Amino acid sequence: MSRSGWLPPHFRSEERVLSRRGLHDWEAVAAMADPMLRELAADGRCSEARLLRLRGQARLMADLNLAPEEAALLLHAGIADRRGLARCDPQAVHRQLGRLQRSLAGSALAPVPLPRLLEWIQRARSGSGRSWN
């Protein structure tokens, strides 16, 4: 099953490399091991760092049942995995995410509502979802 455009446009080169290997969705990216990441980046068509970022996003999505943009926001805020989110202070993360969203998109995006963030943190603390770690 080939799905073009499932990654954001700025990840076109990574999407092409992943598709050539038969990886066409977030679940497949979440399951990638480090040796495969290095192998995919070895020819220089995409960077290992960008593949690592995509895998982190995919794992947050799988672990916490997040949408791609929600997982990307957490990554941009420096929260790379379920354990990191579980240790966060909800109020501090809410402020941080609000500042980050405003700096990235101005007032075009509504901030993550605190109840939604609390739900993510509760999922992270309860360990619900898959664990890739």
Image: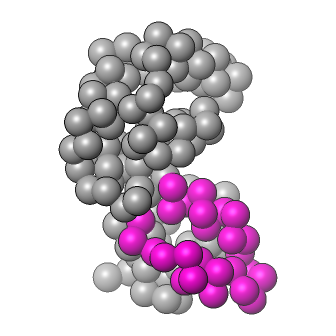
Taking the image as shown, residue 20 lies to the left or right of residue 1, namely right
Q: Quadrant of residue 107?
A: top right
Q: Is residue 29 above or below residue 100?
A: below
Look at 30% across and 15% down and name the residue there.
Answer: 115
The C terminus appears in which quarter of the rendering?
bottom left
Q: Is residue 73 left or right of residue 2?
A: right
* Residue at image point 53% right, 45% down: 80
Q: Quadrant of the N terminus?
A: bottom left
Say which residue appears at 23% left-offset and 36% top-offset: 126
Query: Percent x, y for residue 123?
Result: 26, 35
Residue 24 screen position, x and y as percent: 41, 75
The quarter of the displayed image where residue 75 is located: top right
Outermost residue to the right: 44
Q: What x and y, as percent, mark residue 50?
A: 66, 63
Between 48 and 124, the one lying in front of the other is 124
> Is the magenta region chiefly helix, strand or loop?
helix
Which stretch is magenta? Answer: 30-56
> Which residue is rendered at x = 47% and y = 10% of the image?
91
